[in-house]
Amino acid sequence: MKNTALTAKHVSLGAKMVPFAGFNMPVQYKGINIEHLAVRNAVGVFDVSHMGEFILKGEKALDLIQQVCSNDAAKLVDGKIQYSCLPNKDGGIVDDLLVYRIDHKTYMLVVNASNIDKDWDWISSFNTYGVDMKNISDRTSLLAIQGPNAAKALQSLTEVNLEEMEYYTFKKGKFAGIDNVLISATGYTGAGGFEIYFDNENAEAIWAAVFKAGEAYDIQPIGLAARDTLRLEMGFCLYGNDIDDTTSPIEAGLGWITKFTKDFNNSEALLKQKKQGVSKKLVGFEMIDRGIPRHDYEVVDAEGNVIGKVTSGTQSPSLQKAIGMAYVQTDLAKEDQEIFIKIRDQKVKAKVVKFPFYKVDL
């Protein structure tokens, strides 16, 4: 089991630690609901140093990225970030990721912790371009500081004007007195905020500085359980639950990051899917009757015929209702469509709703 540079800090704060993607990670501190609402209403800090980071450098770095990624990275300029995915050869997804353009021949890819080795091998297998690839995951720490008060809580630590940073942009500079920190206006919570990348050796100093600067804003440490409920309220996909090697980006509603203005791995098959339509779609649903949906529960119609499967589900702390995501037959994927979730052999009524479940006014 790997530790992050901050594992001892989480233990000292009384976090409940669990194995996650090969790492010893804090799942919660004070409780999921408390932590979830702290991020929605104020500001919270996640240690997400288990995520993977690759640096791709060279004249042909963009060519390699264009081949393996579904989105069009040619549209990036220095300091911009793009959400994308790595399609496999069978119509599924190797992983979803962020692409950072540092300059015209230097990019950083941020991948899911459980897929670091898989993604590295996959991208490397297409590297006939002579691109210099470095896996900096083991020496890089990452804090996600999320919530409506994130910019105010962090502003005293940097000369970068955080309030003026646009979503999906980044800047490199001094942060908490430490050089070469990457400040990114991203996060997977829908609550606004930043993700801060830095060397492991600076982890404890930056953690301490962030909490001291955020004291006046009631800054709190947050575990991975609340990260999951926050992303689910936004309808954001979680790799291994809502997308995987068997689900296509078209089925998953990720057509917006699948750009056919260029050729990329398996683009012909995905374009055919887009034109001809797909047999199943990822939808959001909310429970009408009492019950909490869970991963892999069957979705059925009024007659009890199986029409799909739940990929994620929870009791939403913000909305005080049970919500979930599921793949269902396309003809039953329309908004307000009545469906049923099989919970302990009972058909429990639900309805299809639009994403996001929780509407945020940032």
Image: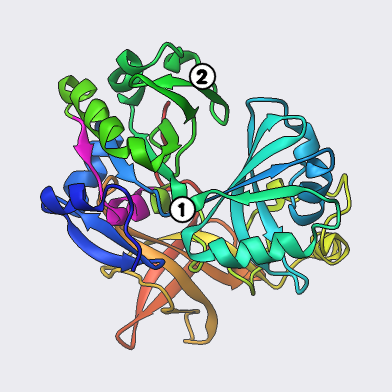
Depth check, front residue: 263 or 301: 263
Indicate the position of residue 190 as horizontal and vertical percent values: 43, 39
Q: Quadrant of the N terminus?
A: bottom left
Q: Give the image's coloring scheme.
A: rainbow
Instruction: Decide: is 60 above or below 225.
Output: above
Indicate the position of residue 110 as horizontal and vertical percent values: 56, 47
| N-terminal label among 2 and 1 | 1
- Give the magenta part as a residue range: 219-230
Q: Disc number at residue 11? A: none
Instruction: Decide: is 224 above or below 153.
Output: below
Badge 2, how many Cα within 10 Å: few under 14, some, many 20+?
A: some
Indicate the position of residue 289 as horizontal and vertical percent values: 30, 67
Marks 2 and 1 in Cβ contact (< 8 Å)? no
- The residue at 19%/47% (across/down) is 9
Q: Pointer 2: what residue?
A: 165
- The residue at 66%/54% (across/down) is 85
Q: Quadrant of the C terminus?
A: top left
- The residue at 17%/46% (across/down) is 34
Badge 1, how many Cα within 10 Å: few under 14, some, many 20+?
A: some
Specify the quadrant of the image occupied by residue 157. Answer: top left
Indicate the position of residue 309 as horizontal and vertical percent values: 50, 76
Give the residue type that dot 2 points to.
Answer: Met
Instruction: Decide: is 108 above or below 330.
Output: above
Discs 2/1, front: 1
Depth check, front residue: 42 or 82: 82
Instruction: Decide: is 194 above or below 34.
Output: above
Depth check, front residue: 288 or 170: 170
Q: Disc number at residue 138? A: 1
- Which structural element holds mark 2? loop
Give the residue type that dot 1 points to.
Answer: Asp
